[in-house]
Image (tube, rainbow, N blue to C red):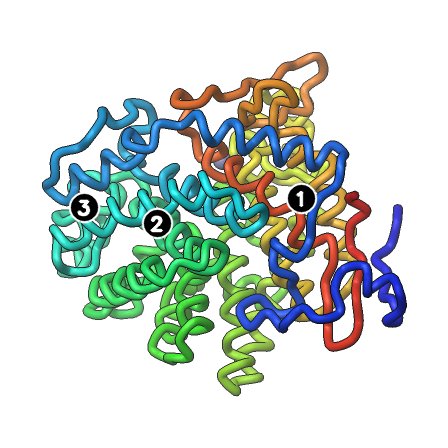
Amino acid sequence: MKKSFLLVVTAASLMVSCSTPNNSFYDSTFELADVQLLEGPFKHAMDLNLKTLKQYDVDRLLAPYLIQAGLEPKAEPFSNWSGLDGHVTGHYLSALAMYYGATGDEWCKERMDYMLSEMKSCKDALGNGYVGGVPDGQKVWDEVRSGNVRILGKYWVPWYNMHKTFAGLRDAWYYGKSEMAKKMFFDLCDWGASVIEPLDDKQMESMLNTEYGGMNEVYADAYAMSGDTKYLDIAKRFTHHRIFDSMLEGVDNLDGLHANTQVPKAVGFERTSEMLAKAGLPDEATEYNKAADFFWKIVSQDRSIAFGGNSRSEHFPTSEQWLDYIDDVQGPESCNTNNMLKLAQGLFRVNHDVSYADFMERALLNHILSTQHPEHGGYVYFTPARPEHYRVYSQPNSGMWCCVGTGMENHAKYGEFIYAKDGDDLYVNLYIP
Ligand SMILES: [Zn+2]
């Protein structure tokens, strides 16, 4: 296996750029526009995925937002995965922004701007900063605000769903350079703050038993974008202590848990750690980094199979249940690896240890690249290790699984981790042309 090389600045680094400005949002990271993929399987996947994205009906994706805002939808909402209405829409917005950032593709920019203007109409109609596709959204969030956090369970996973809208707006700002998205992102952050503000710590912990995606991550991002510590405080409030405290103590308590509910929490621990350090709180930053790093170590090294994926039937097996991987028709889920890569990349930003880059290489080449059909571009949910089994691919405007959402993004940002930088040092992390 190759190792990540730290190069003394020589002609090699000049081939990338010798005048790239510092990225103030993601430390050590090149912007997507700085790195162009050359011919090979990754470029093929990236180009094919753009063709796939262009086949989606954006008005159908946006319909849940309009319905929740009391506006007339311009098309029928998708019928599958109802309850999670709008979650793929957030991923789609992220993917368009990433493609625009990476390639300058004008179609992506136009479609991104169209989505933002439609979402702004929804936001304006509601008037409280909220925009989202969660069914009965206003009722659900009013109930949560009043302390009835159990209502979330009746509506599947509303915070998980909302996280995709938060992240879509953030990405439309960061990758897509949209100031309108930034304004909507902060309005949404302030709306979210008003929902959890009345809740005490016990109610928060109870609420966080229900999958909530990376809500801690996006509030840490809001701090990174604004320097306003109120957002960093909210990122900390989205700390699920059942997981965080155990990780901090170095105790693996993940047996039997729903895997992709947990990974984004650790992504958020890591991002919160980065921002605590920037806020001049090194002790807390160290704690959050320690929890994130322990999570990453046990999942990447003890709980993943050879190709870098984890979970069967979406859950972490106990050590006695590992043979399930041979039998189960639902092998490692694509979303989990998408999030584990995010975690590894975040940890690498802080500590340029080669083990994170090795995991990136292993999981990108062996799992993520294979989650796309190489001809028609459909996305895979599960990658079973069951001998002679098969995989199921989505079709545009049909499957709306979680892994379709993360799948839309996966192939857009291969260029982000190939190189990294720190001062005058250049890191070559991935051998991708
Ligand atoms: Zn998934």
Spatial separation of the CA atoms under disc 3 and disc 1 = 36 Å
Q: Residue at x 42, y 79 (%)?
A: 227
Camera-near label (3 vs 2) is 2
Give the residue at mark 3. Answer: 137
Q: Residue at x 56, y 53 (%)?
A: 253
Task: Residue 410: name its quadrant.
Answer: top right
| Badge 1 element | loop
Q: Residue furthest bottom?
A: 280
Q: Residue furthest top?
A: 388
Spatial separation of the CA atoms under disc 2 and disc 1 = 30 Å
Spatial separation of the CA atoms under disc 3 and disc 2 = 13 Å
| Label 3 or label 2, whichever comes before in sequence order | 3
Q: Are marks 3 and 2 in contact (CB under 8 Å)?
A: no
Q: Amino acid at mark 3?
A: Gly
Q: Position of residue 293 (x, y in %)?
A: 64, 63
Horizontally, residue 94 falls left or right of residue 350, namely: left
Callout 3: CB less than 8 Å from ligand 1: no
Of 158 and 176, nearer the camera is: 176
Q: Residue furthest front?
A: 106
| Label 2 or label 1, whichever comes before in sequence order | 2
Q: Residue at x 32, y 49 (%)?
A: 162
Tell me the number on the disc at residue 165.
Answer: 2
Give the residue at mark 1. Answer: 303
**Residue 417 in view in this figure:** yes
Camera-near label (3 vs 1) is 3
